[in-house]
Structure formats: C-alpha cells, structure tokens
Amino acid sequence: MLTAICIPTVPGNEEVLKKCIDSLKKVLGERNDYFIHIELNDFIGFGKACNKEIKKVLENKEVDGVLLVNDDMEVIDEGRGFLDTMRQISDLNKGIVADPNLHRFVENVDHIAMGFTYLPRYIIEEVGLFDEQFAMLEWEDVDMSVRILEAGYTLNSIQFRIAVH
C-alpha cells in the first residue's frame, strides 16, 4: 500500500502548511507506505488544485489511495493509527473515509467535505476527479460525494477525531 498525501496550498499559507506537515510527520513517523505531495496553486480553487495534485500522484502506479488534506489542518491522532484505520474502513465498506467533523448533511444530501479524506484509487478512476465548475463554493465536495454514492460506493467517517481545522 502506498498513500499519497496531497496538500494543495496557496501563497501566504506557509506558516499553516508547515504546522500541517509537521503534525502529519509527527503522527505518522518514518514509514514507507506514504509520501507527502504539496502543490502551490495561485488561488485556482479547491477542486482544480486537488485535481492537479491527484493527476500527478496517480502517475505513480504504486499509489493505491490519496489522502486529501487542507493546508490548515493539524493532525491530532494521538497514536490511534488514523491512516491504517482509514484504509481498513475504506476496504471494508468500499468507500471513502473522512474525519467525523467533515461528514455532513446539507439539504438532506449526505456528503463529505474533502478537507481530510481518504479516497482509494479505484474510486477516483471510476468516479473521476472534482468537477471544476464549482470554483471555491464547496459544492465540488457535494458533487463528488453524490457521484461516489451513485456509483455504489459509501461515505464513511472514522470513529475518532483526526484533525483540527
């Protein structure tokens, strides 16, 4: 298993990005089953920024999943093994997995805000990337969630808080 941790960021967020990366490295430690990919974007929107990163990391055929992380998240896992747990839940339930605070219902639509979410490669390949027409209004998260559900996959939350925003 190899997970690409994708952190889209913008100019001016260097301080929060450093906290994010430091917290990930502290919790995950020295392991060979993940790598962190950071892409500096010029305010192109969350969906476009994520798509750009996902396309790059999936060029590596060993990558079997992507963990999308907002650059202002800090991991607070406290030794519970969030990455392994997210992978296990994804495998068991055939779906994507997020921090519990990101699993939402808006106008009776079940969706996940993708700010700290594990997506297995096979779901990305079948469902596709974010629809870039939504710009920065967060509807790209809802659209992606609906497409995942329509494809027969599930939206899942890990049972403990992983990160703070």
Image: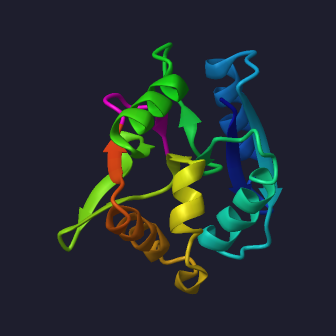
Q: Work out whether residue 43 or residue 131 is closer to the camera in this orientation and state it.
A: 131
Q: Tell me if residue 164 can be seen.
A: yes
Q: Work out whether residue 59 or residue 18 is closer to the camera in this orientation and state it.
A: 59
Locate residue 92, reporting x and y percent: 36, 33
Mark count: 0
Q: Residue at x 60, y 70 (%)?
A: 47
Q: Is residue 12 magenta?
A: no
Locate residue 136, reporting x and y percent: 55, 76
Identify the image's colour scheme: rainbow, by chain, secondary structure or one colour: rainbow
Residue lying farthest to the left in this orientation: 108
Q: Quadrant of residue 94?
A: top left
Name above or below for residue 118 compared with residue 82: below
Locate residue 145, reporting x and y percent: 39, 64
Q: Residue at x 43, y 35 (%)?
A: 91
Q: Residue at x 70, y 16 (%)?
A: 29
Specify start and end residues of the magenta stretch as a single range.
158-165
Q: Work out whether residue 9 or residue 1 is closer to the camera in this orientation and state it.
A: 1
